[in-house]
Amino acid sequence: MSIASAFDLKVDDAVVLNDSNRLTLRLLPCDVVARVAPMAYRASAAFEVELAQRLSETESPVAALEPRVEPRLYERDGFVINMWTYYEPVSSEVFPAEYAGALQRLHAGMRLIDVIAPHFTDRVADAQSLVADRDRTPELDDGNRQLLGDALRSLSRRIQDGGFPEQLLHGEPHPGNVLNTREGPLFVDLETCCRGPIEFDIAHAPVEVSEQYPDTDREVLRLSRALMRAMVTTWRWDRDDQHPDGRRLGLEGLGELRAAVEDDAR
């Protein structure tokens, strides 16, 4: 609130929009969205600001930084903060064709910019480290720990060994990272961007959206969906995970992953 006030924006209240591993606030009445994270997230938060600026130049469908403040990362009291435009939500659902069209435009815009980004296998390696660390995942029993570790390793290798074309990706373009606005669907949470086959991104979208991509490799998409399930399930077993209802989602994820592994073995 003090940072926004320093730019002569009127701020009387801060409403929590989302509270998980990062805190997202709506500052009122100036209508600015502030994303707040511990200092440990400084590099990814700065990366997100850079990407938002670069992608806005390509007219990609991404949420914009707040134009009334300097477009940069702010630091205060051990936290990093960036400021975003607030978009009034539209009540109607995002139809699969709209969703897919926005994701296709995002991918097209990403092909126009040159940034250093991690590979999708780097994100898989982070998940593998979490699975291997019993202190960080104390509630995982040995059987499920092995299930997750084996799935992360084998699925990642099979996708990478395919030698498919790669590009800059959103990393997690699931419905929770899509705003339905009067301007159309806009993607948020760019700190997950990475490089990999386009199927890795499509796997995060609903099945109805992936059906709008007839030219994608169906096998890579299937493997990517299973890999995504393994990664998301891993995050839910992190001791420090703050996702609402995270333990239930973690249990469901293990069940879905086990079923997928059994189907793959047949």
Image (cartoon, rainbow, N blue to C red):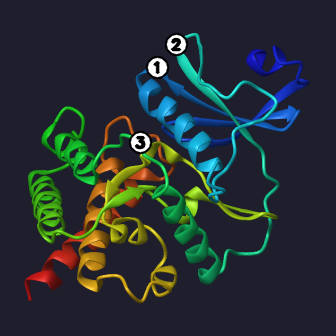
Alpha-carbon neighbours of circle 3 within 10 Å: few (<14), some, or many (≥20)? few
Give the mark count. 3
Q: Residue 25: where, in percent of width, then height?
A: 70, 36
Foreground mark, 3 or 2, reads: 3
Separation of marks 1 and 3 at Cα, in angstroms: 22 Å
What residue is pinned by disc 3? 115
Disc 1 vs disc 2: Cβ atoms closer than 8 Å? yes
User: Can you tell which quarter of the image residue 165 is in?
Assistant: bottom left
Separation of marks 1 and 2 at Cα, in angstroms: 6 Å
What residue is pinned by disc 1? 39
Q: Which mark is residue 78?
A: 2
Could you tell me which quadrant the C terminus lies in? bottom left
Q: Amino acid at mark 3?
A: Val
Q: Earlier in the sequence, mark 1 or mark 3?
A: 1
Question: What residue is at 31 percent from the left and 65 percent from the top?
Answer: 229
Could you tell me which quadrant the N terminus lies in? top right
Q: Residue 164: where, in percent of width, then height?
A: 23, 70
Q: Which mark is residue 118?
A: none
Give SS at disc 2: loop
Give SS at disc 1: helix
Q: Earlier in the sequence, mark 3 or mark 2?
A: 2
Question: What residue is at 40 percent from the left and 60 percent from the top?
Answer: 249
Q: Residue 257: where, in percent of width, then height?
A: 24, 70
Question: What residue is at 31 percent from the left and 77 percent from the top?
Answer: 221
206 up-or-down from 28: above or below: below
